[in-house]
Amino acid sequence: MHEFAIATSLVEALHELVKEQSASKVLEVHLRVGKLRVLSIDQLKFSYEILSKGTALEGSVLDVEETPGYARCTNCHYAEKLETDDLSFHFILPQMTCPKCGTKLVLEGGDECLITRVRIIAPSASPTAPTNGLV
Amino acid sequence: MAKPVDVVTSAEGEVFDVELEVNILRENERLAEENKRRLESKGVHAVDVMGSVGSGKTSLIKSMISQLKKDLRIAVIEGDVTTTIDSDIISSEGVPTVQVNTGKECHLDANLIRKALDRIPLDRLDLIFIENVGNLICPAEFPLGSDRRLVVISVTEGPYMVVKHPMMFLDANVVAINKIDVAAAMGIDPNKLSADVARLNPRAASVHTSCRNGIGVNEVIEKLGLKNR
């Protein structure tokens, strides 16, 4: 159910952007979501579809790039990508130790939840049109 | 306000990409930080009490209040989908209580807590218990601004509550394993649940409790650092 809450925040942020850019329509939305967030992407897309109905977001494509976390050793700088879809691995995270020197590993990344790029249709009168002199 | 666009033409506007890095969870995190600063500035501590439906969160809060209320000025924020049953139970301890009904949401969020804090006399308080909606999944994702976290589970929920919901336990300061008076009848070994907690989060203290006969309530208070303050 937190997918719905996150989709709500996403839609709010996008409406803000639409207003800011005076966009008439949003075509694509790209997200970067860490795997350690354990979000169900299908549920997120489903919620987004419902929430975007009847707005400038309706019909836009929601694309989600999932990124892994890294386990890093604070002692010998050993680092490993956590490439797994097995959720039970959360269970061992707090006790993971470095295979090289035995120091406890710390986690880096994998918990982000970002909007990275949005494709919009904006009015053709661009406010940033080149001018012929210095302002 | 948004006008319906069927066909995209150049006259209508140009298509372009906006590159950005907006953190979708940022708003909740920002509000949680704000709540935390607000509580700190008033010298008020807050305990986020999370746990499954029917694990005994309200009973444990009530038991702790009856032990603490002679020394500390306490208030409670009660989160539920609907009804004021829990705040009615807590009110019988004579402490100010705010009921937050989330309607359809499965967790409290920092914005709801911000609004609840407006209705509590922070200047005249030492401690706030925030009882989250009964749920072992979603509340883990939404910090509220509390300075300590208590997770309550009970032996009636079976032997796998901890291993099946690891996220909830990673940031807990104290885990109460409740209803141990019926552990034998349920065929559950509470020590096994404690061992699961210890493996997942070695920093968390796990305490066996029974609110019905007061077992472990003092120890939860101690481990939360709420004694002698």
Image (cartoon, rainbow, N blue to C red):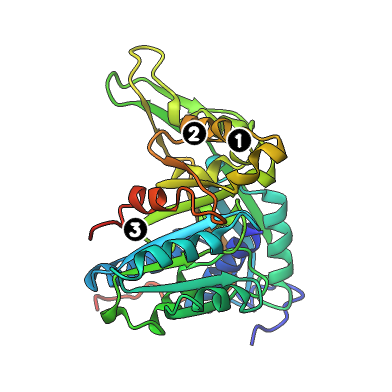
Residue A101 image offset from top left, x and y in percent: 33, 13
- The answer to which quarter of the image holds residue B188 is top right
Which residue corresponds to the image point at 60% horizontal and 48% vertical from the top-left?
A: B179
Residue lying farthest right?
B6
Under mark 2, the amino acid is: Leu
Query: Quick check: do tags 3 and 1 share a chain?
Result: yes
Residue B9 image offset from top left, x and y in percent: 69, 73
- The answer to which quarter of the image holds residue B120 is bottom left
**Callout 2: helix, strand or loop?**
helix
Label 1 – label 2 distance at C-alpha: 8 Å
Mark identifier at residue B147: 3
Residue B50 image offset from top left, x and y in percent: 52, 56
Q: Earlier in the sequence, mark 1 or mark 2?
A: 1
Which residue corresponds to the image point at 49% horizontal and 79% vertical from the top-left?
A: B98
Left or right of B93 on screen, residue A24: right
Can residue B54 be seen?
A: yes
Q: Are marks 1 and 2 in contact (CB under 8 Å)?
A: yes
Can residue B23 be seen?
A: no
Mark identifier at residue B200: 2
Q: Which residue is mark 1?
A: B163
Q: Earlier in the sequence, mark 3 or mark 1?
A: 3
Residue lying farthest top?
A100
Residue B202 image offset from top left, x and y in percent: 41, 33
Which residue corresponds to the image point at 55% horizontal and 64% vertical from the top-left?
A: B58
Q: Are marks 3 and 2 in contact (CB under 8 Å)?
A: no
Under mark 1, the amino acid is: Val
